[in-house]
Amino acid sequence: MMTHKLMALGPAVGAVAVLLAIAGLLTVTLTSPDGTDATPPESVDQAPADSFDLQAAIDSARPGAVIEVPDGTYTGPFRLDNKSQLVVRGSSSAILMAPGRDEILTITGGSDITLSGFTVQGDYEHIPQRAITLQNVSDVTLTGLLIRDVGFAAVYAYPATNLLVEDSTITHVGDFGVHSKEGSRNVVVRDSTLTEFASRLYPGHALYFQNTQDAVAEGNYISDLPRGTGFDINAIQFDSVTGGRASNNVVERAVAGIGVPSSIDIAIVGNVIRDTYERAIYVFSGADRISVRGNSMEEGVRGIQIIGGTNLRIVDNTTDRVDEPLDLGGGSRDGIVEQSGNSWQD
């Protein structure tokens, strides 16, 4: 069989090509006048909501596919196993749910996957539930999602490499908003809203980076993280992280703002932390090379609490209406290598 690329050679050649293709004698690849491939991508799946089978669309999707989820409610659980170069998108009126199930949407072994725009509706009374589970994946983007009413965790990654969560809203969750662990790398959560967390199974956190390399929380709004049943809850925590940054986040009404236990090379920069019940920023034993710079802390019991750590830099921070701006707690000044430009107002 002959294979040819056809340029814009006129209707006569085009008609002959069509006839040959129908006869099975020619494979046609559309090419634009500049020589680039103009073959259209795989068709977007746009079935009516009442006949749309999301799992079937996922199972049949080839690399490069775009699945458009119509508005409506879809009951799972759903799985994306070993998929690559796949986009699943919909509006906030496209709702995925799985009442009484531990997982709603699970991605395993895949790469280059984007989930965009739709809603994942949890079952808050089912305490073990995770909304989006990522296992052994890479290059995953979650953008513009609404994740709500989830029993345990909204996004649970173990591990994920090159995970981006952006422009999303996560609200009313039992323990964790985004939890990366078990060797995850390059995890970024930015420009998202995370509100209304409890702490039912574990000490919960809106953003919990654990055993992760290169973790970033940037430009997020985090609020309403009250004490849970028997546990305290924190907005952002770097736990056994190598390389991380929390910058330009706003945290309001939380037990604690940003915590750094047993982590290395963490920058806490330019955050606004208001109305914390215990402390705005804290550094635990085992932390090394931690920079706390240019943060504003307002209305709370403690500003910065040091319970250990080495090579700590505390520079250009401000407090306002904070009872104890700098609390050395169980630590000492020995771990602080730079302390300057701070404005402590109680």
Image: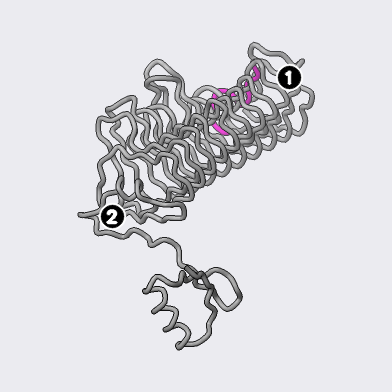
Q: Which residue shows up at 68% across the image and 13% down it?
A: 331
**At label 2, which amino acid type do we have?**
Asp
The answer, for residue 246, to whether it is visible in the render is yes
The part of the chain drawn in magenta is 298-307
Q: Which residue shows up at 53% across the image and 40% down it?
A: 138
Q: Is residue 301 magenta?
A: yes
For label 1, the crowd category at 10 Å Cα-Cα, with few meaning under 14, some 14 to 19 and many 20 or more, is many
Asked whether the residues under the numbered discs 1 and 2 touch, taking CB atoms below 8 Å apart as contact, a structural biologist would say no
Helix or strand or loop: what does disc 1 sit on? strand
In the picture, measured across the screen, residue 60 lies left or right of residue 220, that is left
Image mark for residue 71? 2
Tally of numbered tags:
2
Q: Is residue 248 magenta?
A: no
The answer to which of 11 and 266 lies nearer the viewer is 11
Helix or strand or loop: what does disc 2 sit on? loop
Q: Quadrant of residue 131?
A: top left
Label 1, on which residue? Answer: 310
In the picture, measured across the screen, residue 250 lies left or right of residue 66, that is right
Residue 116 coordinates in the image, percent (x, y):
42, 51
Q: Which residue shows up at 72% across the image and 35% down it?
A: 316
Q: Quick one: which residue is furthest to the left in this view? A: 50
Magenta stretch, main secondary structure, is: strand
